[in-house]
Image: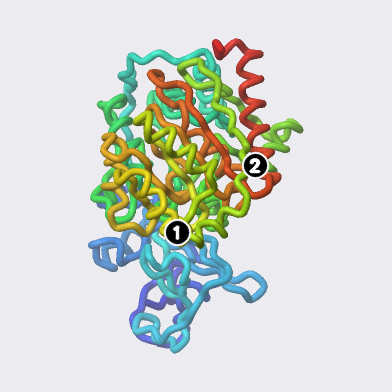
């Protein structure tokens, strides 16, 4: 599609005529003032409020969409801008991955498009981003949205109050909470406060399985609030909702949408490494708005900002059951990889496994690489047949994890795919090859956090088998011990 400017308005044309341009090449896009007498389409209002969508995302005709633009109810935004003659995707923030193609819409031979966010629909130089500029779709103001009778621990309550105040004051807060501290419950009162004011709230997380876990929990405690779960293939994609739980990738479709935005597992891949996802989070916020970050393992930069007072934060250094965090044991096991090639394990590792098997106690054994894990599996299966292995590309991954939850599997070998987001009560954990660089401080803290999460089994063993201690191992152990020390000082643990 191309546009010409006539009477200070854009007008779409479908041929390459004189003075017509793709929207990206127009210096300044005129935006008509809202016409109060215009009868706008409420479905378009619902679909586009707080969104940035393409024509192809909508079933409405170009003519109907353009009539809303002419009357000031839809804004056309450039999909690609140029900074120092370099393309920049306005939707996802990509400034590196672009390609060109002969386009039948704008009739240019080299129409640029963004390769990075193409899975959300192709953003090309001639396809404007559509945003609602009329009155927002009205949201329900609840008298008391929260229906939860649970009890917060002392540490949770302090964090909950800080979250609520941050939302009221529209500021930013990092909640640095140990694994198993009950971060989700800490959000309830703050979310309730936002909903009472008729605000729109989003909880964003890097992983789909967390969305699927959180959505039913939040629907249960906010039963009178419209809740949508957004991820690849979600049926809630166009559902108008006041409370949204979404993968961070889904935020590419939002623009100045949320009064309160929560980013869970802010340290997790891919969000922590992908600047476009971080761009999407910022673009999805209203101005002003509140931002809450949740993590058990902030990176070194954020930890330094917390210590220096440059970042507002609140710690929850203890779990709700008031037991201290299990501290990792460092155990040297020699050149384990060389032994594995000979179809053997270090004696000390075999002994650790056999003790759990003989006691009928479930265990997780983390390994750095799939190839190594596949070689270790038949070795440990000599000890017991009820041992499985799982990794990210495993087609039976969900079934194997469920078998572990149902205690049908005694020992599960795994890569870092299970370092977070899973809870197995009454379990011991070991890492074989803890010296490998894939086991960062963050990963090791998360892995240690699998132990002792249940109130019925608040203790357990976490062992790092290594062929040489690393700084990551030492820092991870220190972080856990520091949290225990802080929790004791605040009277949050009993042991």
The C terminus appears in which quarter of the rendering?
top right
Is residue 114 positioned above or below 305 on the image? below
- Residue 38 visible, this angle: no
Of the pair 5 and 334, the residue shown nearer to us:
334
Q: Residue 271 appears at what percent x and percent y?
A: 52, 51
Residue underneath mark 1 = 370
Is residue 85 positioned above or below 300 on the image? below
Which label's residue is closer to the chain start, 1 or 2? Answer: 1
Mark 2, Cα crowd under 10 Å, few <14 / some 14-19 / many 20+, is many
Of the pair 313 and 146, the residue shown nearer to us:
313
What's the residue at 33%, 81% (across, down)?
A: 14
Q: CA distance from mark 1 to mark 2?
A: 21 Å
Q: Residue 405 appears at what percent x and percent y?
A: 30, 36
Of the pair 91 and 474, the residue shown nearer to us:
474
What's the residue at 39%, 27% (across, down)?
A: 426
The N terminus appears in which quarter of the rendering?
bottom left
Helix, strand or loop at label 2? It is: helix
Q: Quadrant of residue 412?
A: top left
Q: Is residue 203 left or right of residue 333?
A: left
Residue underneath mark 2 = 473
Is residue 372 positioned above or below 11 on the image? above
- Residue 230 visible, this angle: yes
């Amino acid at each position: 599609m191309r546009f010409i400017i006539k009477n200070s308005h854009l007008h779409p044309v479908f041929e390459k005529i004189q003075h017509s341009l793709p929207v990206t090449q127009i210096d300044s896009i005129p935006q008509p003032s809202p016409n109060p007498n215009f009868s706008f389409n409420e479905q378009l209002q619902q679909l586009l409020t707080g969104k940035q969508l393409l024509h192809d995302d909508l079933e409405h005709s170009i003519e109907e969409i353009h009539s809303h633009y002419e009357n000031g109810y839809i804004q056309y935004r450039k999909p690609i801008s140029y900074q120092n003659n370099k393309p920049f995707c306005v939707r996802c923030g990509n400034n590196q991955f672009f390609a060109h193609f002969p386009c039948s819409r704008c009739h240019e031979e080299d129409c640029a498009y963004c390769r990075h966010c193409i899975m959300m629909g192709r953003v090309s130089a001639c396809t404007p981003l559509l945003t609602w500029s009329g009155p927002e779709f009205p949201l329900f103001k609840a008298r008391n949205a929260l229906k939860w009778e649970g009890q917060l621990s002392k540490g949770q309550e302090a964090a909950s109050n800080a979250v609520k105040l941050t939302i009221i004051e529209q500021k930013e807060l990092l909640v640095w909470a140990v694994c198993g501290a009950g971060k989700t419950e800490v959000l309830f009162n703050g979310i309730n406060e936002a909903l009472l004011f008729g605000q729109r709230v989003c909880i964003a997380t890097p992983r789909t399985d967390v969305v699927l876990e959180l959505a039913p929990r939040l629907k249960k405690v906010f039963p009178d609030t419209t809740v949508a779960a957004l991820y690849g293939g979600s049926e809630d994609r166009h559902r108008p909702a006041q409370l949204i739980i979404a993968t961070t990738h889904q935020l590419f479709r939002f623009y100045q949408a949320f009064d309160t935005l929560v980013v869970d597992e802010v340290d997790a891949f891919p969000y922590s490494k992908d600047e476009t996802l971080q761009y999407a989070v910022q673009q999805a916020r209203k101005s002003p708005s509140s931002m809450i970050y949740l993590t058990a393992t902030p990176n070194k930069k954020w930890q330094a900002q917390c210590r220096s007072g440059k970042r507002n934060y609140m710690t929850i250094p203890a779990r709700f059951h008031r037991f201290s965090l299990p501290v990792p044991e460092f155990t040297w096991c020699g050149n384990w990889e060389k032994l594995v090639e000979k179809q053997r394990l270090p004696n000390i590792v075999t002994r650790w496994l056999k003790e759990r098997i003989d006691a009928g106690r479930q265990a997780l054994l983390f390994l750095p690489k799939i190839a190594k894990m596949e070689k270790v599996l038949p070795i440990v299966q000599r000890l017991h047949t009820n041992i499985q292995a799982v990794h990210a590309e495993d087609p039976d991954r969900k079934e194997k994890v469920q078998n572990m939850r149902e205690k049908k599997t005694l020992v599960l070998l795994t890569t870092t795919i299970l370092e977070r987001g899973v809870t197995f009560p009454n379990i011991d954990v070991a890492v074989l090859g803890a010296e490998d660089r894939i086991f960062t401080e963050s990963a090791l803290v998360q892995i240690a956090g699998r132990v002792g999460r249940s109130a019925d089994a608040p203790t357990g063993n976490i062992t790092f088998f290594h062929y040489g201690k690393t700084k990551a191992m030492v820092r991870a152990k220190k972080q856990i011990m520091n949290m225990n020390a802080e929790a004791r000082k605040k009277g949050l643990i009993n042991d």
